[in-house]
Image: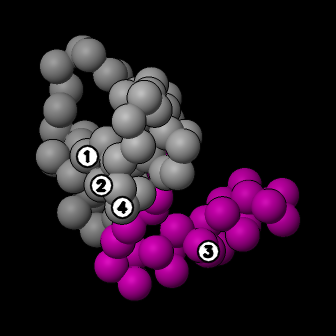
Amino acid sequence: MTGSGEDWLSDGLDVAGADCGLWVSGVDYMSGWRGAREAADRLNRALLGAGFELSEVRAVASTGEGGRGVVRVTGWPDAVERLAVLVEAVARGDGGAA
């Protein structure tokens, strides 16, 4: 959804290079961030589809060392626990049934 005007997914928390400390001249941080943003948007849509609120748990795009895109999942502990249960169920092959 990058570039589609649906910034409600990001809520302004995805800042390129925010967690990498010092920026290095000549490193293309924006390219890595754009890829991370697309992945974060996709995960956020999936979270919404699974019944999560983005105020509880969400994916946030950033960049790491060398300009590589990074997606972090951040949220309230209880929502992250529910997400872990869902992922574990899918990994077991029972389709998300808890």
What residue would you read off at disc 3? 85
Which numbered disc, 4 or 3, marks the residue that appears first in the sequence? 4
Read off the magenta span.
69-98
What residue would you read off at disc 2? 18
Mark 4–mark 3 distance (CA, rounded to whole Å): 33 Å
Residue for point 35% across, 56% down: 22
In the image, residue 46 sits, relative to residue 18, either above or below, namely above
Badge 2 marks a residue whose secondary structure is: loop
Q: In the image, which is nearer the foreground, mark 3 or mark 2?
A: 2
Mark 3–mark 2 distance (CA, rounded to whole Å): 30 Å
What residue would you read off at disc 1? 15
Residues tagged 4 and 2 counted as in contact (Cβ below 8 A): no
Residues tagged 4 and 3 counted as in contact (Cβ below 8 A): no
Whole-percent x and y of residue 53? Answer: 28, 58
User: Any mark on residue 21, and which?
Assistant: 4
Residues tagged 2 and 1 counted as in contact (Cβ below 8 A): yes
Whole-percent x and y of residue 91? Answer: 80, 61
Please indicate, yes or no, whether residue 8 appears anywhere in the rendered image. yes
**Magenta-colored stretch includes residue 81:** yes
Q: Between residues 88 and 39, which one lies in front from this camera angle?
A: 39
In the image, residue 25 sits, relative to residue 60, either above or below, namely above
Judge from the rendering whether residue 43 lies leftward or rightward of residue 44; answer left or right: right
Which numbered disc, 1 or 3, marks the residue that appears first in the sequence? 1
User: Any mark on residue 83, and which?
Assistant: none
